Amino acid sequence: MPLTDLTKDAILKAMGEFDALGREEFLTSYGFHPARSYFLEHDGRRYDSKAIAGVAHKFVRPGDGPLIASSFSGGEATVASKLRELGFVVNEDADNEPSASRNPHWLRDELILALELYLRNPQSPPGKTSKRSSSCPPRCTCLASDWAEPRKESIGTRMAST
């Protein structure tokens, strides 16, 4: 079986390549799709477990190269258990939705807007499809100015007054 020979060092090298290339380029270069359920977590970063295992194979057996995605299965019984056996943390996302399962990387302005919308509507915050969430007001008055200077009131006080 191709995964039995994997080593911790090979996994670390594959993660280093993932970090150097970035997720999209790494997955595309090796022909893997984004993980649906199992993610390897290491040093505060998250990796597609099957792709990492497949690429790590080339560091164990350089003559054979990386494993092709269709040549082995991912999941608990294969990749996740092998990575855990090597001492890594592998987590399963319950919703099995790759894009929905991860928190997006928010920009500062997006965080301000999201908090602004929530604080203006604490009983009924707008959702993804709400027209209120599709455009930013000219100035996020509630929070934007407060972030430049120390807070003079607590969030509880501010929410009570909206």
Image: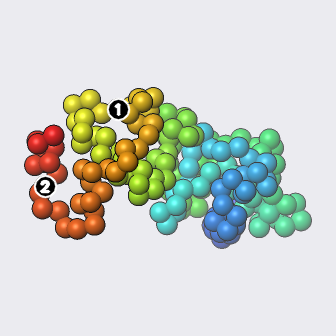
Residue that carries the numbered disc 1 in the rendered image: 126
With 88 as the anchor, is 18 left or right in this view?
A: right
121 horizontally vs 53: left or right: left
The percent coordinates of residue 135 (x first, y second) are 44, 40
The quadrant in which the C terminus is found is top left
Q: Is residue 124 above or below residue 143?
A: above
Q: Determine whether 70 is above or below 131 in the image.
A: below
Indicate left or right for 99 with 28 as reference. Answer: left
* Type of the residue with mark 1: Pro
The image shows a total of numbered marks equal to 2
Closest to the observer: 14 or 1? 14
Image vertical order of residue 56 relative to residue 158, above or below = below
Q: Nearer the viewer, residue 19 or 91?
A: 19
**Which numbered dot is residue 69?**
none
Identity of the residue drawn at 49% across and 53% down: 105
Instruction: Look at the picture and state if 6 lies above or below 81.
Output: below
Q: Which residue is mark 2?
A: 154
User: Which residue is situated farthest in the front direction here?
Assistant: 138
Write the residue at 74% across / 47% down. 32
Horizontally, residue 91 falls left or right of residue 33, namely left
Q: Position of residue 152 (x, y in %)?
A: 12, 62
Q: Residues within 10 Å of mark 2 (few under 14, many from 20)?
A: few
> What's under tag 2, amino acid-wise?
Ser
Q: Residues within 10 Å of mark 1 (few under 14, many from 20)?
A: some
Q: CA distance from mark 2 to mark 1?
A: 23 Å
The residue shown at (81%, 44%) is: 71
Let me know if residue 3 appears in the view: no
State the image coordinates of residue 80 (x, y, percent, origin top left): 59, 48
